[in-house]
Image (cartoon, grey):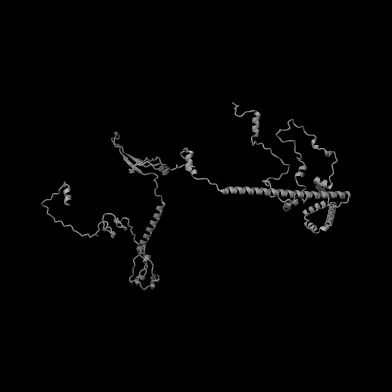
Amino acid sequence: MAALAALLPLPAYVPVVSDEDEEVPQPAPSQSVITRTPIPPYGQRVGWKPLKSDDFGDGGSYPECHVAQYPLDLGRKKTAAGNTLALQVDSEGNVRYDVIAHQGQRSGKYIQSQFKDLVPIAHRKDLTDEQRTMERPSEEDVQATADRTRAALEQLVSGKIKAAQPKHVPDAQGKTTYIRYTPGQQNGGDNGALKQRIIKMSEVVEDPMEPPRFKHKKIPRGPPSPPPPVLRSPPRKATAAEQKEWMIPPCISNWKNNKGFTIPLDKRLAADGRGLQDVHINDNFAKFSEALFVADRHAREEVRQRALMQQKLAQKEKESKEENLRMLAQRARQERSGVAPSRPTAESRAAVTSTLAGYGSGSESSASDAEPEDSEEQEARKLRDEMRAEKRREREREMRMSNMGAEQRAKMLARQQNRDISEKIALGLAKPTMSKESMLDSRLFNQESLSGSFADEDNYNLYDRPLFHGSTAAAAIYKARGNIAEGNDDSFGGGTEEGIGKALDNDRFGLGKARVGFEGAEDQEVREGPVQFEKDTGDVFGLDKFLDEAKSGKKRGLDTDV
């Protein structure tokens, strides 16, 4: 302290002590002994744990002590007061378990938490007579209770109303202030009286929805402070191997080029990495294509063999039916001429047998094969039975014709007239027309003269009008014979859905149904007349243009228009 006092300058103002003042003895300061826990010096703190604030003094923690340290209680979690209640007993020494029910309740509130509270007051033994008597409260108590209740309710209602009201409501008229103004210069008018004025000042009400009038622009930030220098080792020249290792390919995207740079192909390929991988084609692709080719070839061969087989079967069936019809027509001519039928030859018998086999006579043929010694007699008997059946059918037909009416007979004759001429010739019913009028077509007479230029040479108009236009011939050719409305039940299966389905499914020649039809055939509508073709006017291959240029005589490579 003496050294410090010697260093300090002398005071500027020294207090003056008079001699008259009596020296008052000042009491000596009380010295109290403060005991502190000694802190071991550095290097001798092994096993010592600083736990109190006095162990740290005014400093920080001790790094050599590996324990949790809280100097000046920094970082120490403050433990909140727990809600554990102290154990209490009543006057008799019994534990009061109803303290939990009284916890957090207002003072003066009566809580029934014991068994004695269930006993009527008149029967309770622990109460005196004064406590048993229940007097009515006085008017002052009733009024005080009512005032407290009203104040509590008003506080609740006012809180609800304030919460519902808007917080910041702008004043509609604005704040108004009145100012008395007295001018400083007087003109001497009105006998030199001062002219005072009262000025009313009010704030302009601002619209809260009005957009801002001024645009706040941010001032660019000033230059930052220079960064601290980073000390590095002096640069060394990199070798070729290090440069190759540090070579990073450019970041080139195949989708984005915002700056619009022109990227060379070698850089793009280097960034893409195509040259770093080899292209390997799996051998299964070749095997798969070869398998598809072989399967296609086998399928085409099977389809061709199946088509040839069906064609041969149809041709054989057609020949057998033609042979049968020829034999029947020959037999009908012989019977009509009165010539006895000759004994059937082996070829005719084979033809008849094959024909009858197609109509379901397989059992008889198998029986004839089983007895080869009587085959000729059985064939002769079979022919006789067929002739008898044919005669019987003719007699029945003639009887029906004689019994039917005129209308039905006319329909029958009309149906017979529409039969195929080849069938009439085979049965000997065709008769030539001998009238001269029907030998000439009346449409050739009284025709208008044709124009000089009949038509363009591109058009395919060989005739001026259709051949069967507006006549019944086209209806007879392209429509089925018979009329369902007039009572012909044989046409279209009687007109019913079931009958039409059976007629369509009837396989007369046993060829079977076509497995694959023409593509798009089911989408076409039914045709009621002859096939009509449409001319394609589009020049697909450019032939018309080529011919026009050839006719004009222009040469290629010469601009003749200039």
Whether residue 484 is visible here, answered yes or no, is no
Q: Quadrant of residue 206?
A: top left
Task: Decide if residue 199 is on the left or right side of residue 410.
Answer: left
Where in the figure is residue 313, as x and y percent of width and height?
74, 50
Q: Is residue 100 above or below residue 319?
A: below
Question: Residue extending furthest left?
Answer: 19
Q: Which residue is nearer to you in this view: 522 or 192?
A: 522
Whether residue 422 is visible here, answered yes or no, is yes
Question: Residue extending furthest right?
Answer: 338
Task: Decide if residue 96 is on the left or right side of residue 274.
Answer: left
Where in the figure is residue 467, as x and y percent of width and height?
76, 39
Q: Which residue is nearer to you in this view: 116 or 370?
A: 370
Q: Which residue is nearer to you in this view: 318 or 215?
A: 318
- Tally of numbered tags: 0
Q: Is residue 50 above or below residue 244?
A: below
Image quadrant containing the C terminus: top right
Q: Residue visible at 76% across and 47% down? A: 480
Q: Is residue 112 above or below residue 535?
A: below
Q: Which residue is nearer to you in this view: 312 or 371?
A: 371
Question: Residue extending furthest top?
Answer: 562
Q: Is residue 35 above or below residue 471?
A: below
Task: Decide if residue 148 is on the left or right side of residue 483.
Answer: left
Where in the figure is residue 329, as x and y percent of width and height?
83, 49
Task: Decide if residue 341 is on the left or right side of residue 96.
Answer: right
Where in the figure is residue 311, as x and y percent of width and height?
73, 48
